[in-house]
Amino acid sequence: MSTDVVKKEQTELQKKEQTASERFTGMVMKEFEGNVGELNLNDYQRQLIRNYFIGIDNALRNAETSRQLSTKKKDDPTVTWNNVNMNKLATDVVQNAKLGLDMSIANHLHVVPYKNSKTGKYDLNLMAGYEGLKYIATQFSLYKIVDIKVELVRENDTFQPVYKNNIEGYEFKITNPFNRGNVIGGFGYIRYENEIHNKLVVMTVDELLKRKPSTASAEFWGGTKYNYTTKENEKVEGWTDEMLYKTMVRATCKKVTVDSKKVNQSYIYVLDQNDTYYVENQEDKISQEIEENANKEMIDITTDSTEKLPASADDAENTVEQIDIQTNNKSEGPAF
């Protein structure tokens, strides 16, 4: 057999072989259809699912590295595909893909892993990031949205709400970009094609901080954290401004009027999943959260972190940020 013939046969074989992400897509569809029913996905939605595989695979690798380095989690099950609750993951993957959330876009979609002590496996929640929330709000708005702008206002900035010709607006100026001072509040501005619908959302820093979870991670909200190596509490600067910004984004997106004719099963499912964690009135959800997460432990990829259950909706975001997935990292993946 000539060399050319061999090369041709090898090329044809390679074309037939599925990549790990393609096998993942097929597995997800099979799992979903077995539990929910017939599923039809277009080419773009299939591509989104293939992107999800890369992001989820990286999240599992990061979580497993953390488990191995953590003295508290070394006896936990290995964080691998074999120990993932594929039933729930398949539903999350399909519904987010049908909605159009893209894990390859920064802050569109994040992975939040939990250890389910009841099943001995890991549950993976897919959570919309702040860009994902803006995308959903834009797609399902009753009126066509041109832009959703969100800013934090600092002590040395100038900000003034403006109401002219029955149109909401604002004036905002950063007077000194090198010395803006502390955050004193924030605003979100929803600009519609028909400006009569424009909406300005304004919140003070105290109002933003009210949405800070009761068990907020010091790595992100700042504060103190126990160091298991030194056996002492240490001060952590955190990313407070970034967390305040994301809180402002969520509050702004909630003000978008939804077109009921556009609402579908995927929209309801994804928003319900997010609202489990992102609620404004934490007290109303605490008992429900405790019951729903009674057998779950959030996987913290920072080593030797304290194990805790999310006491409020926003708690999950702290872990979301710790495993923000960069999907351009290559991964061999499991053999589905």
Image: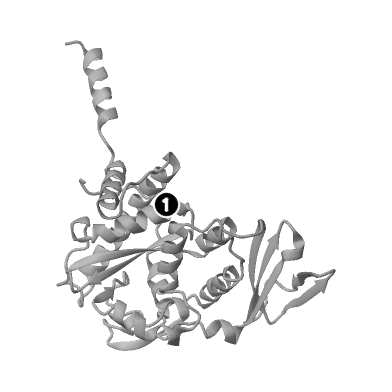
Residue 309 place in picture, x, y as percent: 31, 80
Q: Nearer the viewer, residue 27 or 173?
A: 27
Name the residue nearer the viewer: 36 or 316: 36
Label 1: how many Cα within 10 Å (few below 14, some 14–19, many 20+)? many
Q: Position of residue 264 (x, y in %)?
A: 47, 57
- Figure quadrant of the N terminus: top left
**Vertical comparison of 222 with 10: above or below:** below
Q: Residue at x 55, y 76 (%)?
A: 244
- Tell me if residue 253 can be seen: yes
For disc 1, the marked residue is 97
Report which quarter residue 167 is drawn in.
Answer: bottom right
150 relative to 276 in the view: left or right:
right
**Amino acid type at image mark 1:** Ala
Q: Viewed as shown, does residue 37 lie left or right of 129?
A: left
Q: Residue 91 occupies which quadrant of the picture?
A: bottom left
Residue closest to the far top:
2
Instruction: Tell whether 233 sits left or right of 205.
Output: left
Can you say whether 316 is above or below 323 in the image? below
Q: Residue at image x 23%, y 23%?
A: 10
Judge whether residue 102 can be spotted in this image: no
Q: How is the image coloured?
A: one colour
Percent coordinates x, y for residue 191 in the rendering:
70, 62
| Count of marks, rendered view | 1
Q: Secondary structure at mark 1?
A: helix
Extreme right residue here? 165
Residue 288 percent location from the top left of the image: 35, 81
Quarter of the image for residue 85 reads bottom left
Q: In the picture provided, is 152 more to the left or to the right than 112?
A: right
